Image (spheres, rainbow, N blue to C red):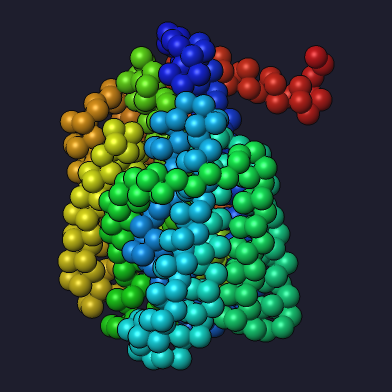
Amino acid sequence: MPEMPSEPDATHGSVAPTRLLFRKIVAGSSLYSLAIVGSTLASIVLLPINTRYLTRSDIGVLDLLEKISIAVSYLLGLNFSSAFGYFYFNRPSAEERSPVVGTMSAGSAIMGIFAGGLSWILAAPLSRLVFASPDYAQYLRVIFLLMPLSFLLEAGMGWLRVEDRAPAFVAVSFLRIAITICGTVVAVAVLRLRVWGVLTVNLTAIAVLAVVVTVYCFRHYRFVFEWPLFVKILKFAVPLGLSGVAMFIIHFGDRFIIPHYHPLGDLGIYSIAYKIGMLISVVFSAFQTYWNAQVYQIAKREDANAVIGRTFSYMILILSLCLVGLIVTAKPALQILTTRTYWEAALLVPVIVAAYFVRAIGDFFRCVFLVEGRPGYDAACNWIGAGVCLISYFALIPQWGIWGAAFATLITFTVIGVVSVIWAQRLKPFRVEVGRLTKIFLAAGLPLGAYFLVPVSSLPVEIAWSALLLLAYPLLLTILRFPTPGEWGLVRSAVEKTRRAVGLVGP
């Protein structure tokens, strides 16, 4: 990687070399990835339990309950905590940031009380609307009861991110994982509580973590609540909430439409396929967790144009590896982890993975809207996508079912991605490394072409073929001369440090 010039850091006034910045991005993303990967591994560990002790209908019901909770959070909670980074980095000192932290925490709890209270009242109508029966209102009321604590936890995790307290963020996340795994084994596998068991475990984890994170936060900041600041944050959050509603429609609207045209069991298959396909979002989220909190100060650098463009190339590099890996390993993974009734979900995985790969591109460009203080652009972009999505859902799902839903998602994220790129480049253009991106897409496209052209049926052969195709990706990148001499040097340095760390060579 060629060395870029250093310049004063916009926030702290110190010299921040570009290479050091990329190392911080990698280190921060890697730490956050521990939490996200840990959560994903927990889902994989629990998959055999859930698929054996829950029916396909149970999984579909749980999926819908989760989506209702998210929808209420966006619609009534206005995605309030998403404004944290913008207001936090507008205050230069810790003393000036105390009102932001206090107002954001208290404001999130207030929004949670409002959203949870109103939704509790509407639980029965919501149950009839979504499930065509009032019988599920009891589940909804339990979810809405702890919504204030859920909002408070979200604000606390946002504070950990903007302060880049990655170790604490990871510790809290692993505590949640431990509660979830242990609780699920007891409540679902031992006590056979089914839906009630899963809900009880999830809500217990939220309550415990909300208290832990809030206490930890206000050991570092004195609590200050400012009503005018709350109003400012609320105004900033309104477009973000509307944007969240649009993204909810895009992400989860199909879950509500599919049961009206096809059996609820199809939703169970679709949910399993989504869990695998969205693993690419897990990887992106590790980077996004760091990037979206720190981009506000990175954008103030004199070399921001080059830094953002290079960061985008690295993001695509990693996500392309994930794209190839998830597509070629989905079928053998499902055969190992689930019963035969869920194996057909592997066929949907390539479409879903492609959709969320495209989504990551759009999300990267849309961060420009918030950096520039234009949350309305984000809302407008996502609502264009929501319109396309609804049209696609009702055009494709009645006839094609879960396949129609998957392709509608891909179409929607493509539209959002194109609009995001055009608008972001007009608002704050940055250089895109077209030549390097072309090499990445070639290195990913060739193994995928081989995968679809050479089908295999034996599980051992599938595993070996998948491993070979994965190895082809870095090999092709090397043949295409993607890495620069500077990047090769960093790789050799990292390998050497790793070998020394594990005691393979002397100091």
| Nearer to me, 196 or 376 | 376
Residue 320 location in percent, x, y? 42, 40
Q: Is residue 379 visible?
A: yes
Occupied quadrant, residue 408: bottom left
Residue, x 49% and y 73% (percent of image)?
144
| Nearer to me, 182 or 320 | 182
| Nearer to me, 335 or 305 | 305
Residue, x 41% and y 81% (percent of image)?
121
Report the side of 187 relative to 274 (left or right). Answer: right
Report the side of 492 relative to 18 (left or right). Answer: right
Residue 94 location in percent, x, y? 55, 30
Residue 419 location in percent, x, y? 19, 43
Occupied quadrant, residue 69: bottom left
Report the side of 502 relative to 193 (left or right). Answer: right
Where the C terminus falls, by quadrant? top right
Residue 218 location in percent, x, y? 63, 45
Q: Is residue 454 visible?
A: no
Vertical relation: 73 (above or below) 299:
below
Report the side of 261 relative to 468 (left or right). Answer: left
Residue, x 58% and y 30% (percent of image)?
27
Residue, x 42% and y 34% (percent of image)?
315
Vertical relation: 460 (above or below) 490:
below
| Nearer to me, 135 or 229 | 229
- How many numbered marks does the figure carry? 0
